Amino acid sequence: MDNEKFGNFIKSLRKEKKLTQKELGEKLNITDKAISKWERGLSFPDITMLNSLASFFEIDVSELLNGEKGIKKEVDIEKVIEETIENYKNLAEKRQIKIKKIKKIIGIISIIILILSLLIQGAYLYVLRKHNFEYVIDILEYIMNEITIVSATISMILLTKNKRIKNIITYILCALFSIVNIAFMFNNGFKNKCIISFSSDFSNELVLKANKDTGAIRLYRNQKLFLFAKENEQFEHELDGEIKKQWLENDICAITYKDKDGNLREFVVTYGDRGNGISYYYVTTALIGNWQVSTQYGNATQMLVDSKGITIKKNGKSELFKYEECKQYGTIALVLYKNNVPKYVIGLDKNCEIDEKTDIIKKGGTITLSEISMEKNISESLYCMTYKNEKDLSNYNVVSVGKNDYKIQNGILYISYDGKNTIEVPGDFSNMINNYNEFNYQISEEKTIFYYTKDSKRYLVYSNDMGNNWNTVEIENESSIQNIHFVNSNVGFMLKFEDVAMGIAFGKISKTTDGGNKWNDIFFGVGNENKIFKRSSQIKFINENIGFLTMPSVGGESSDLYITKDGGNSFNELEITENNNYDYYNLPIIEDGVLSIKITQGSDGDYNGGDYKVYYSKDNCDNWSLER
């Protein structure tokens, strides 16, 4: 007889009667467990119950034994029962063999776990602990103890032939050892708040322990098997509250927390290097240049690193961090402080490579910038906007500046004579971004001069040797500077306006003969009584004696030109053409040693298509002609 078929048949009959196993057992005066064993094919009803069981389900005994309704074959009941009992015996033997096999496997696994736990605990107790290593989580020591106790108990029970009494003793010993171990765990395993974090690629493991009573935070390094680590250093400030972890890179993890006075604190754990692993370098030096977030939307976050410090421009606001407000961690991270409060953390990305000669990040390296707070922060990736030569960074500039041009960044004025090398002009040019026109500064091989104002004072800063040496001199600050022009390193002229109204300017022309240290006022404007200049007047001298002064009208319709031949002490109007259509005189230029003046028709000119005339002089401005 098929045991499984018989069990399923009993189950289907019970369900036809809509009875539970318990209800069926009550009707047959047997337990529901017996019913369950029948239905699972694990046992067979007693022979004395077959008739009552068949009668209850309203079937024939032969149908019951055959496990199917409608089959009423003659059945030798005693023979069938004997066969069934034999089947059950065979099934029980197979089950016992399977159970023994499972016990053996579990026992072997327990032995393997026991050996591993003993090896780990032995390595810790007799080797690692002597070298000041600890478990990364304090309770791991007691968890390993418990694993050892349980695995030893299971191994002894399953792999040895112990009598029941011996097994009971083994269980009791296991319970006693476990109670003692758990007691020690609760006494010693929860004194510290243990913090573990892994980088995204699992190459580095952060291990921190904060004492729950004192708040002291300890950092652990030299991790072994992810289970052990050695104390490396203790944080300067104690913890009060939670710790925030932020992986900027797989080898840079920023730690943010508040101390017991409620002050925000920052510590950066670094595991890597971007250089050759031997030399030490300053992150601030590596960051020199102009950096920006790569985006086409909104105000892109920018960062400028120059001689003044690190300037962060974010959300329309600019903030300068001087170098003494920066703290370096390892050789790949930097924290920026303002009034001792951490504001930003900067990390060098893995694609950064440090140039061994200059200690500057090579072309293509990016950095990660993140604001510091206990809230969730979004890190931003910045790339360097300043040009970097892939092969040579020896002439690397903080900012890129065109030939004979200047640029003001972070209050610093940079100039370049060749469009490649950049020179920093000494002085504070924070207030000068919109103060220069094309005439009130000069960049040349013989003379380079700029001016700036600070604390209500005005200064001239100049160089006579292309930026190798600089001089700074204070001058009067009662008027605006319209024009500065030097004809050589010593002789120069300056046009200054004291007041401007209705297109008319009141001012003066000053002269220096000692390079710009001392200035003497020499001319006060055109006219007899009310000497004046025009609002857009400019001056230009071609040597120490000959110079020009423009007097443009307000709307630019015309412009008179005045000339001096006595070094700027007096000016006379210069009339070159009698054609009234050409009435806008520009300042002269010198090309290949020839002086020329371009005369246009002004803003209202439309004669002959609005053309212009150019006149040339070869005899110190005495005569002018259209022929060169």
Image: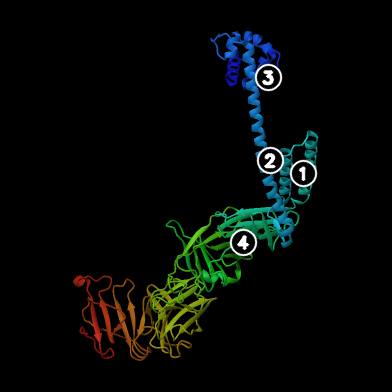
Sequence-first disc among 4 and 2: 2
Residue designated by label 2: 107
Q: Residues within 10 Å of mark 1 (few under 14, many from 20)?
A: some
Q: Which mark is residue 178?
A: 1
Q: Amino acid at mark 1?
A: Ser
Location of residue 502 with respect to 448 vertically, above or below: above
Sequence-first disc among 1 and 2: 2
> Considering the numbered disc 1 on the image, is that residue within a helix, a strand or a loop?
helix
- Which scheme is used to colour this image of the protein? rainbow
> Considering the numbered disc 3 on the image, is that residue within a helix, a strand or a loop?
helix
Q: CA distance from mark 3 to mark 2?
A: 32 Å
Q: Nearer the viewer, mark 4 or mark 2?
A: 2
Q: Nearer the viewer, mark 3 or mark 2?
A: 2
Residue designated by label 3: 34
Whole-percent x, y for residue 591 in the image = 29, 83
Residue designated by label 4: 269
In the displayed structure image, the side of residue 196 where residue 289 appears, left or right: left
Q: Residues within 10 Å of mark 2 (few under 14, many from 20)?
A: many
Q: Nearer the viewer, mark 3 or mark 4?
A: 3
Sequence-first disc among 3 and 1: 3
Q: Is residue 71 visible?
A: yes
